[in-house]
C-alpha cells in the first residue's frame, strides 16, 4: 500500500521526547507523500523551538504527572488527566488518525489511552534504558513498542518490542564519519546540559575553564547553557578571559559535534544517541533526579563500550578536572573513545526509518483488516439475498 495516512504524535516536554517523534514523522511523510502528522504536546518552549520552523499542526494539553507531587496536588492532576483524555477522544473522532505514536511523558498517557479506546493502532517509542511511567503503563495496551536501548525490553510484554534505536538527524550521523585531530590545539570542549540547560553543569564548566586556564592548557569552549543562565555564563567566561561561544540552544548540532574534541554532557536519551552517532568522546554526568535514575543506565551504555567516561554529579568537583586533563594530554585515549563510538552508534543508525516502518505496518494492517471486514460483510449480505433469507428482496 502507498496511500497517504494520518498520524497523531504525543510528544511533549523536552527535546528528548520531541526529536525522536519528529524524525519518525518526517520519515513517514517522506515515504507516504500527502500524509498528515499532528503533534500533541504540553506547550513547553522546547516543543515550539523544535517544531516551530516547520509549522507542524499542534494541539496543547494542560497535563502533568503525579510522581513527586504532594497528595494535595493529586485532584488537580487527575482533573487535568480527565480533561486531557476527553480532548484526546475528540481528537480521535475529528482527525481520524490511522496510527498513533507516543514517545513517553505526561501527554502520552491520555493520548495513548484515547487511541486504544478508539481502536487506533498504538505504537510507543521508549528512548531510555529504563522506561518512564506512561510508557510502562501503556505498554500493556500498545500494538508495538520500539526501544532506544535493548535493556528496556524487560519492562514490556514479550513479543511486542523491537530495538529501533534513538533516531538522530542524518547530518549528525554524518559528523561521525570524519576523524578528529585530537592533537590539535586549542582543544574544543563542548558543554551540553540538555535542551533546557543544567545549572550544575554550567557551574562545573566555569570551574573547569578556570582550572584549565590556570594550568596553561590551550582550549576553547562551546557551551549550550539553556536560556535561564545564558548571560550569566557568557559573563563568567569573559571575566576569565576564556574563548567561549555560549548559546541557549544550538540548532546546527552537527557542526558543533564536528568541531568539538570532548563533551561534558548529561545523559538524556537524545544526547546519548547523538554523541554515539557523532562518535564524540564524552564525559557523562547523569542527572541525579532523573526518573528511576534512567540517565545513569544511558551513560553506562557508552561507558561500558569505551566511548565515554561516567562521573556522577556528586563527584564532579573531585574528578572532572583530572579526567579532562588526562584525556587532553593523551590524544590516543580520545582517539580510542572515538573508535568505540562506532559500535555504540549502531543503535541510532536509521532510527527514524525503523520507527516509520513500524508505524506504516500498523496503519496498513488496520486498513487491510477494515477492508477485509467490509468485504466479508458484503459477501454475507449477498449470500442472504441470494438464498432468499430475511434480507432478500421480493421478486418483481
Image: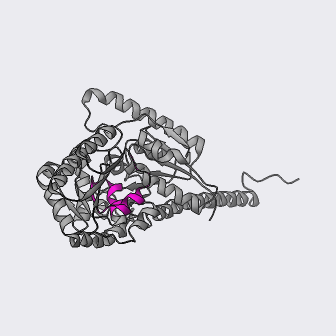
Q: Where is residue 318 in the image (x, y as percent from the top left)?
A: 10, 52
| Residue 148 visible here | no
Write the residue at 31% across / 47% down. 133
Q: Where is residue 116 in the image (x, y as percent from the top left)?
A: 47, 48
Q: In the rendered image, which quarter is residue 203 located in?
A: top left
Taking the magenta stretch, the answer to whether it contains residue 318 is no
Colour scheme of the rendered structure: one colour
Q: Nearer the viewer, residue 151 or 391?
A: 151
Asked if 92 appears above or below 139 in the picture, the reply is: above
Give the residues in magenta.
Answer: 249-275
The reply, left or right, for residue 376 in relation to residue 348 is right
Q: In the rendered image, which quarter is residue 81 located in?
A: top left
Count of number-bearing discs: 0
The reply, left or right, for residue 208 in relation to residue 268 is left
User: For the N terminus, which image quadrant?
Assistant: bottom right
Q: Which of 207 and 339 is in front in this view?
A: 207
Q: Where is residue 136 in the image (x, y as percent from the top left)?
A: 33, 51
The residue sitting at the right extreme is 396
Amino acid at each position: 500500500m502507498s496511500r497517504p495516512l494520518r498520524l497523531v504524535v504525543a510528544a511533549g516536554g523536552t527535546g528528548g521526547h520531541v526529536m525522536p517523534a519528529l524524525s519518525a514523522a518526517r520519515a513517514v511523510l517522506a515515504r507516504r507523500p500527502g500524509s498528515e502528522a499532528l503533534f500533541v504536546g504540553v506547550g513547553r518552549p522546547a516543543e515550539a523551538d523544535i517544531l516551530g520552523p516547520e509549522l507542524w499542526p499542534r494541539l496543547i494539553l494542560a497535563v502533568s504527572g503525579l510522581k513527586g507531587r504532594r497528595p494535595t496536588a493529586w485532584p488537580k492532576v487527575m482533573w487535568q488527566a480527565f480533561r486531557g483524555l476527553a480532548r484526546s477522544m475528540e481528537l480521535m473522532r475529528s482527525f481520524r488518525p490511522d496510527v498513533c505514536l507516543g514517545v513517553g511523558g505526561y501527554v502520552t498517557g491520555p493520548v495513548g489511552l484515547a487511541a486504544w479506546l478508539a481502536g487506533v493502532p498504538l505504537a510507543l517509542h521508549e528512548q531510555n534504558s529504563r522506561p518512564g511511567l506512561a510508557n510502562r503503563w501503556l505498554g500493556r495496551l500498545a500494538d508495538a513498542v520500539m526501544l532506544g536501548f535493548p535493556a528496556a525490553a524487560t519492562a514490556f510484554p514479550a513479543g511486542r518490542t523491537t530495538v529501533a534505536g534513538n533516531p538522530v538527524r542524518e547530518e549528525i550521523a554524518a559528523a561521525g564519519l570524519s576523524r578528529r585531530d585530537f592533537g590539535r590545539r586549542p582543544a574544543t570542549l563542548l558543554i551540553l546540559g540538555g535542551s533546557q540547560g543544567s545549572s550544575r553543569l554550567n557551574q562545573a564548566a566555569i570551574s573547569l575553564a578556570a582550572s584549565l586556564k590556570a594550568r596553561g592548557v590551550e582550549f576553547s569552549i562551546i557551551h549550550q547553557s539553556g536560556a535561564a543562565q545564558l548571560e550569566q555564563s557568557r559573563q563568567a567566561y569573559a571575566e576569565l578571559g576564556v574563548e567561549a561561544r555560549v548559546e541557549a540552544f544550538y540548532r546546527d548540532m552537527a557542526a558543533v559535534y564536528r568541531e568539538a574534541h570532548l563533551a561534558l554532557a548529561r545523559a538524556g536519551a537524545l544526547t546519548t544517541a547523538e554523541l554515539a552517532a557523532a562518535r564524540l568522546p564524552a564525559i557523562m554526568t547523569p542527572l541525579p533526579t532523573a526518573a528511576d535514575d534512567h540517565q545513569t543506565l544511558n551513560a553506562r551504555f557508552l561507558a561500558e563500550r569505551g566511548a565515554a567516561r561516567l562521573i556522577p554529579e556528586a563527584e564532579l568537583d573531585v574528578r572532572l578536572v583530572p579526567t579532562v586533563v588526562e584525556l587532553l594530554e593523551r590524544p590516543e585515549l580520545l582517539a580510542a573513545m572515538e573508535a568505540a563510538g562506532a559500535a555504540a552508534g549502531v543503535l541510532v543508525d536509521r532510527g527514524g526509518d525503523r520507527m516509520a516502518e513500524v508505524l506504516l505496518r500498523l496503519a496498513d494492517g488496520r486498513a487491510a483488516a477494515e477492508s477485509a471486514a467490509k468485504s466479508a460483510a458484503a459477501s454475507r449480505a449477498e449470500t442472504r439475498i441470494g438464498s432468499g433469507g430475511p434480507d432478500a428482496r421480493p421478486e418483481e
